Amino acid sequence: MHIFDRDTKLRETAPSVYTGAISENWLINKNPNGGYLMAILARAMTDKSEKKSTPILTANYISRCRPGEIAVRVEEISVSKQFSRYEARLFQDGVEKIRAFGTFADENMDCAINRNESSAPMLAARDACIGMPPIPGYTVFDNLELLLDPPCAGWLQGKLIETSENRGWFRFRETRQHDIFSVLQIIDSMPPAAFASQGVTAWVPTIELSVSIRTVPDTEWLRCSLRTRHITCGLLEADCEVWDETGTLSAISRQIAQFRIQ
């Protein structure tokens, strides 16, 4: 079993109640990655949903999680011909930590129109990109390989730019076929875009993350871009796009996070 599947595995121990554990293998600044936690919640919701295609997921991160045992409670909100909607709540030590909502579509949804008014980010060839160095407390990069596009990688050496954007290539270090869960992990694993302009001077904890998955990618490597345009009153937004190697859009997301000077 792939490490990611093992670390997101849940067991239904009572009707609509799942138990599992948060792993130490997907940490960002010593905290469990938000996309990893969303993947766990998505596993619980998809187990209940007959419809499993092109999910739209939104999670509110109420308080900080830690590695260790968890419980996830799932409730059906509504089921129609096209969509199934669920709520999932993650508890740790009896306290609610995350509340998420998921909308799942029928696999036979009409895809007659495919129109993109933007395209996949232009990236340098992978052998010209810059790999993430080992960073204490960032175990996610022990399991995901990120190659940053050189123009936005200066923050690794204290060289900042005017634009808050990180771009690069992503894949699992241990080969794994992509699915909605892997996309949720990768879409929230890019270092904060604000690092490119502000440096590694802040903690950027997620308040809310919304992800819309359009297609499951077929290629091993994914092109990703993360952009922040506004940092105001201690808050920022971060918009991410994930594309496969062929230029097909896989997912888009918007994150609202705090910007705390360390």
Image: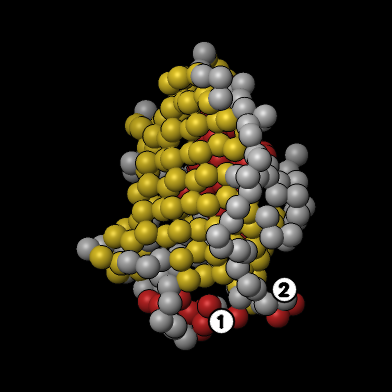
- Of the pair 160 and 116, the residue shown nearer to us: 116
**In this rendering, position of residue 172 left or right of residue 261:** right
The residue drawn where x is 37% and y is 59% is: 237
Residue 48's x, y, as percent?
Answer: 57, 21
**Rendered view: 38 above or below 202:** above
- Of the pair 31 and 234, the residue shown nearer to us: 234
Secondary structure found at label 1: helix
Residue 182's x, y, as percent?
Answer: 64, 46
Q: Quadrant of the C terminus?
A: bottom left
Residue 228 is at least partly visible in this image? yes
- Of the pair 105 and 11, the residue shown nearer to us: 105
The residue drawn where x is 46% and y is 66% is: 227
The residue drawn where x is 41% and y is 53% is: 255
Residue 17 is at least partly visible in this image? no
Give the residue pinned by disc 2: 126
C-alpha span from label 2 to label 1:
13 Å
Give the residue pinned by disc 1: 151
Q: Quadrant of the N terminus?
A: top right
* Type of amino acid under label 2: Arg
Secondary structure found at label 2: helix
Q: Counting other residues with Cα less than 10 Å from the Cα at mark 2, is it few (<14), some (14-19), or many (20 or more)?
A: some
Residue 158's x, y, as percent?
Answer: 46, 84
Residue lying farthest bottom?
Answer: 159
The residue drawn where x is 45% and y is 19% is: 78
* Type of amino acid under label 1: Pro
Residue 127's x, y, as percent?
Answer: 74, 77
